[in-house]
Image (spheres, grey):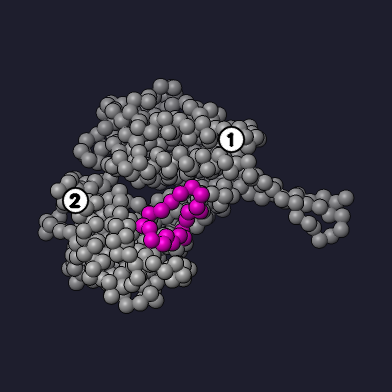
């Protein structure tokens, strides 16, 4: 059962009540449901508030609202859509402390990642999209036959389903709908159960910016309802395209369901990013960037550095620099980093203990012989050396504060090792020789390669996406807009 209202929550910062219910947003209304689920602060393990949980009826209502809003929204002039994006950016900036508070509370992230990175990056994304809307144009090809003419229109698909994760909720949540909205589509945003209030905030920002009712509908649901609700959304005839950001495992399920229904999908999935430290690298710079890339946000980033591949001639001094960088940025005297759930800590502990039992070495950090508490969400950075292909850690995305250190004797060996994974999202190369770095970059099987900076790099003017099992299609920039436009060819005879 659902009830409609307009005051389900308010701009009151991150302070909440365990009895407060974060509503769904359907057709411009805030909807509370009798079925709810708890939202937990990972830093304390305590319930901070509850979230409404969408039923199949709520999902259908969201689809129908988006479908009804599409004819009018798809005909709006680019300038109107531009102005809404700019207004949303302005509102997001003005509410940065409030929204950053939600993110820190729901995901355990620190202020530099929430208000220092996620909010500003989302503001810039909305501004970048706004500036590109008026550049969308069709074309006038020259036909081969005399007297035949043609025009190619760029048109929106219709209703777009965006599914985004909890770990960078504003960048990934806004991204899941903003490019589709900018090109005239209407949207449904499916929120993760860990951060529903962050996703409520995305809907709130757009509504405050003047986005018409029905153009953006925000749903959240209990984990046990995920399969039923997601399948319904994908299979509904009104939903014309899906974009998903998340794990490769879940992405394959989404892609299969979309393929069964012959619907296009945009996928940004997991990664096993390598940082290649070549023989001529600036070791201090490389060590600092590798430490940040591996342990930023507790390694819970799809672009996080999972492998550090260093040339044998500099392995010893580099390892010293890396140890120093880790101890400076993530000091042992401070509290251990927070993961969003105890499951992440357990996963990393299992991967590391398995590797150590099969001959790997603990190069930097310490690991208790005892398994972590079933409720523990804290873990310190670990660097594991002598990892080999027979170990699960070699292949598996840890998505936590664990990185493997490899030593090789040549650039060729470094590239081969970087490519020895089913993933291909991002990579870093450290060298003082630009030509050498570009040469290595061209050989790495990855959607992006960053020279002399960490693997975690995403900005709105750069296309973002992966190859292999890291996904297909691109968010951001002009490519991000094109993903949500289809071509219609019209010809006529004189």
How many angstroms separate mark 1 from mark 2 (CA)? Answer: 46 Å
- In the rendered image, residue 271, in percent from the top left (x then y), is placed at 38, 59
Can residue 354 be seen here?
no
Res 327 quadrant in image: bottom left
**Residue 224 sits above or below residue 403 on the image:** above
Classified by dominant secondary structure, the portion drawn in magenta counts as: loop
- In the rendered image, residue 54, in percent from the top left (x then y), is placed at 41, 35
Q: Please state the extent of the stretch shown in magenta in the rendering.
A: 447-466
Left or right of 404 on screen, residue 420:
right
Res 422 quadrant in image: bottom left
**Of residues 381 and 26, which is closer to you in this image?**
381
Can residue 281 be seen here?
yes
64 in the magenta segment: no
Tag nearer the camera, 1 or 2? 2
Marking on residue 331? 2
Q: Quadrant of the N terminus?
A: top left
**Residue 35 sits above or below residue 491 on the image:** above
**Residue 8 sits above or below residue 85 on the image:** above
Marking on residue 169? none
Crowding at label 2, few (<14), some or many (≥20) Cα neighbours within 10 Å? some
Q: Residue at x 39, y 72 (%)?
A: 415
**Of residues 96 and 304, which is closer to you in this image?**
96
- In the rendered image, residue 354, in percent from the top left (x then y), is placed at 21, 65
Residue that carries the numbered disc 1 in the rendered image: 81
């Amino acid at each position: 059962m659902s009830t409609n209202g307009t005051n389900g929550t308010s701009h009151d910062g991150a302070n909440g009540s365990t009895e407060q219910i974060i509503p769904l947003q359907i057709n411009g209304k805030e909807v509370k449901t009798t079925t709810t689920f708890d939202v937990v602060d990972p830093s304390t393990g305590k319930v901070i508030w509850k979230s409404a949980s969408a039923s199949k009826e709520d999902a259908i209502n969201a689809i129908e609202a988006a479908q009804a809003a599409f004819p009018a929204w798809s005909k709006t002039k680019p300038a109107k859509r531009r102005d809404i994006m700019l207004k949303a950016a302005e509102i997001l900036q003005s509410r940065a402390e409030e929204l950053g508070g939600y993110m820190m509370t729901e995901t355990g992230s620190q202020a530099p990642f929430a208000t220092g990175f996620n909010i500003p990056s989302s503001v810039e994304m909305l501004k970048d999209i706004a500036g590109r809307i008026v550049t969308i144009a069709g074309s006038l090809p020259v036909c081969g036959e005399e007297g035949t003419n043609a025009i190619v229109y760029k048109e929106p698909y219709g209703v777009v389903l965006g599914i985004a994760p909890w770990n960078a909720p504003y960048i990934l949540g806004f991204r899941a709908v903003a490019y589709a909205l900018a090109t005239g589509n209407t949207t449904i945003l499916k929120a993760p159960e860990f951060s529903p209030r962050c996703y409520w905030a995305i809907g709130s920002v757009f509504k405050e910016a003047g986005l018409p009712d029905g153009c953006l509908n925000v749903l959240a649901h209990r984990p046990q309802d995920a399969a039923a609700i997601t399948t319904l959304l994908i299979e509904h005839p009104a939903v014309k395209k899906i974009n998903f950001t998340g794990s490769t495992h879940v992405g394959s399920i989404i892609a299969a369901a979309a393929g069964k229904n012959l619907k296009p999908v945009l996928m940004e999935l997991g990664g096993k990013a390598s940082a290649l430290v070549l023989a001529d690298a600036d070791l201090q710079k490389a060590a600092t960037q590798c430490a940040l890339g591996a342990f930023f946000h507790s390694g819970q980033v799809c672009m996080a550095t999972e492998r550090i591949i260093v040339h044998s001639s500099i392995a010893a001094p580099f390892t010293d620099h890396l140890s120093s960088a880790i101890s400076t940025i993530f000091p042992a005297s401070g509290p251990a980093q927070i993961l969003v759930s105890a499951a992440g800590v357990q996963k990393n502990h299992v991967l590391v203990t398995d590797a150590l039992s099969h001959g790997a070495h603990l190069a930097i950090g310490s690991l208790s012989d005892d398994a972590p508490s079933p409720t523990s969400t804290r873990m310190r950075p670990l660097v594991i050396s002598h990892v080999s292909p027979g170990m699960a850690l070699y292949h598996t995305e840890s998505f936590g504060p664990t990185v493997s250190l490899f030593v090789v004797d040549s650039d060729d060996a470094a590239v081969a090792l970087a490519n020895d994974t089913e993933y291909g999202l991002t990579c870093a190369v450290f060298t003082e020789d630009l030509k050498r770095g570009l040469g290595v970059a061209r050989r790495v099987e990855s959607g992006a390669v960053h020279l002399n900076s960490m693997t975690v790099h995403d900005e709105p003017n750069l296309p973002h996406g992966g190859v292999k099992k890291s996904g297909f299609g691109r968010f951001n920039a002009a490519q991000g807009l094109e993903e949500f436009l289809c071509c219609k060819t019209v010809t006529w005879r004189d």
